[in-house]
Image: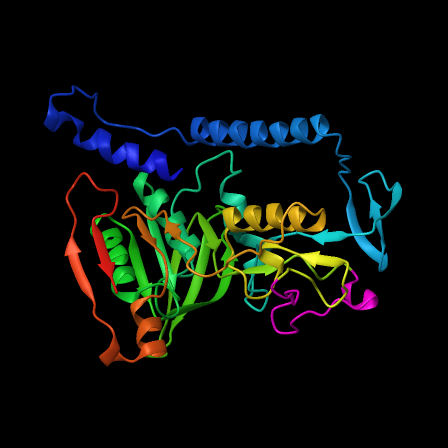
Amino acid sequence: MHQAALLGGMIQDAHHYGWEVAQPIRHDWRKMAEAVQNHVKSLNWGHRVQLQDRKVKYFNIKASFINKHTVCGIAKSGKETLLSADHIVIATGGRPRYPTHIEGALEYGITSDDIFWLKESPGKTLVVGASYVALECAGFLTGIGLDTTVMMRSIPLRGFDQQMSSLVMEHMESHGTQFLRGCIPTCIKKLPDGQLQVTWEDRTSGKKDTGIFDTVLWAIGRIPETRNLNLKEVGVNINPENQKIIVDAQDITSVPHIYAIGDVAEGRPELTPTAIMAGKLLAQRLFGQSSDLMDYNNVPTTVFTPLEYGCVGLSEEEAVAHHGQEHIEVHLWFSPPQMVLPWMEVL
């Protein structure tokens, strides 16, 4: 979807380079959504085939622990399956979080998981949140021509370098994304015509305001899928504040033969390639092929906002906190057009 938005921008510019492009340029959400869904389905099928080729048994069931070595899975039909193993790896990932304390949030809002499976265009959209997920979604929605507003409580891209984050937001604003800064939603109501009336509060002034949208998308963080695993009953310790599983450097939980990798593990980057590598190294350690540990330091990451932003290592704010302002140097320059990132910063 990010690529679809980038292509739209290129098509807009194409006539300057001699390409005759019919006007007006229209985007077909249905075609894009179908292509995305078919691609995901093909990936899923490919994984199933690889598992079969390697004689790995696959169970499409929802499981939970009944003792330290056994899980019970329940299929959609209601059939129960018991599975026991010497080693158990928890890699259940996470799901987007809903603000259930806000009236109408659960009934009328969607999340970043849902946006990719909508068969019809979301239309005028309010994206609530300032994470990279929020800004990525808002960026591609604006890029394909939809009226898009981002409501952010505080700063954009928390945890990333704030000078770079400001550049990303300024770029989005200049290309049509609207921002409601320092605001929090308080209520969502569905109108007779199906549109959504959103009421929000400005945290600085205390004033309330309303707006009408076709879609409200929550992008306010994710929660790990650990609540229904019966972890407490088998002695797997979790962080009570965020429900993530506490692990050591070898990805071992408080139960020596139970492991956790990916987004469910405490203190790990929530990045798919990182979890994949951690899983490969864990498998190699378990079966004697290697003793290498996953190195979670200096993991590069990319934010697919319209102004793409990649980073690795400490942000400037983190570098100052760790080493002190007097011990760091910051170099900022504008890179040549042929490079992927328009701005770079080196500490």
Q: Quadrant of residue 248?
A: bottom right
Quarter holding the N terminus?
A: top left
State the extent of the magenta-drawn residues as a range.
Answer: 230-249
Report if residue 240 lies within the magenta region.
yes
User: Which of the 4 quarters of the picture holds residue 202?
Assistant: bottom left
Q: Quadrant of the C terminus?
A: bottom left
Residue at image position (38%, 58%) is 211
Question: Residue 68: percent from the left, percent from the top?
Answer: 84, 60
Residue 3 position in % (x across, y down): 35, 35
Residue 10 position, x and y percent, is 23, 32
Q: Residue at x 75, y 58 (%)?
A: 258
Count the marks.
Answer: 0
Q: Residue at x 64, y 51 (%)?
A: 282
> In this image, 115 relative to 165: left or right?
right
Q: Is residue 62 left or right of residue 145?
A: right
User: Does 229 sit left or right of 283 as displayed?
Assistant: right
Q: Does 86 lie within the magenta span?
A: no
Q: Left or right of 307: which side holds 188?
A: right
Q: Quadrant of residue 74?
A: top right
88 to 339, vertically: above or below: below
